[in-house]
Amino acid sequence: MKKILNFVILFGLIGLTIWIFVSNNDFDNFSELIQSTNILFLLIAFLCMVLYWFFEAYILHKMKKTLKINASYGSSLKLCMIGQYYSAITPFSTGGQPVQIYSMVNDGVPIGTASSLFVNRFLIYQFVMTFYALFMFIIKFNLLYSEAPFALPFIVVGGLINIVILMGIFLFLLNEKFVKTFLGKSLKILYKLKIVKNIEKSEEKLNNTLLDYKASVEEMKKDKKTTIQLIFISVVQLTISFSITYFIYLALGFEMGHFIDIIAIQSLHYMAVSFMPTPGTAGAAEGGFYMLFKIIFPKKILAFALMLWRLIDYYLRVLIAGLVTLVDFICRSRRVNIN
């Protein structure tokens, strides 16, 4: 049933994207644009997305090593793709990390250790993403103010949300008492709702999980060198991801736009729409692209550029990550049946 719902969501997003194109654009020049598009630059744009996945897998693999989890790079790449798929089809991109934690627990990793890995990964990502976008906002403020003033409130709100979330994660990591109190009260609410049956057993399991969690966090705090390396790698990873739009720009035959302008606008676009409550930020992603990238693309090209960006950055990601997730599900099911 869940898989059917996922496909319904996916086709719904495709339908919404098509509707946005049809209601706002003239398609008379699309056939001409398709013929004149440079395929090599499109392939490089696709390669940027693939490199983003490989960097993410490397980061997860490095963090596993820090926590002394024995696993191959291939398993980290698979874990990355599972996260990519579920993040892409769930509101607020909230589905990825819980499924990744579940996958690691199925592979024998304690839930506290798996949770600490992804909380720390989210903290590093959120830290880099927030300050990356804020830096770009500062150096490109005049460009935004003069060319896209209506987008500024959305960028500011997105930035504030990211900062609040970042502060919340720091509190969650650094204040053990807060974590224990929060989870304990959550457990009591679940017990009152009759979701949790045996509260004593659940509290014991929670305490053991917190011990694993605390030990894992302390282990990662000790390895400051790795943390600095992962922050640097995350900066490179995000730059590669934001470069997808730049290579689409080149694929459409343009050369005058500056690389730094395009990745700056893309980073601010991401920050502005990343917490919109639709799977894949559908609607918001398209609207934000129109609002911000009119600075870069001519109006008659903008819809086609958006279509190429959304195809590479979202739909191909869902397709490829979905296939990896499906293969993993089939393999796990076979192993369960054999055992």
Image (tube, rainbow, N blue to C red):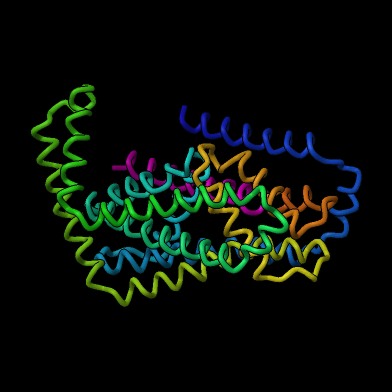
Q: Which residues are magenta?
A: 311-339
11 shown above or below 77: above
Say which residue appears at 48% left-offset and 60% top-offset. 129
Is residue 320 at least partly visible in the picture?
A: no
263 shown above or below 312: below
The chief SS type of the magenta part is helix
| Displayed quadrant of residue 333 | top left
Q: Position of residue 317 (x, y in %)?
A: 58, 51
| Displayed quadrant of residue 46 | bottom right
Say which residue appears at 79% left-offset and 38% top-offset. 24
Say which residue appears at 14% left-offset and 36% top-offset. 202
Q: Is 334 contained in the magenta span?
A: yes
Q: Position of residue 293 (x, y in %)?
A: 71, 55
Q: Indicate left or right for 260 with 97 as reference.
A: right
314 shown above or below 189: below
In the depicted view, which residue is nearer to us: 195 or 156?
Answer: 156
In the depicted view, which residue is nearer to us: 316 or 119?
Answer: 119
| Displayed quadrant of residue 163 | bottom left
Q: How many marks?
A: 0
Q: Is 87 contained in the magenta span?
A: no
Is residue 214 at least partly visible in the picture?
A: yes
Q: Position of residue 45 (x, y in %)?
A: 67, 63
Q: Indicate left or right for 212 with 76 as reference.
A: left
Say which residue appears at 25% left-offset and 52% top-offset. 108
In the depicted view, which residue is nearer to us: 258 or 118?
Answer: 258
Query: Which quarter of the figure is the C terminus placed in?
Result: top left
Q: Position of residue 93 (x, y in %)?
A: 47, 44
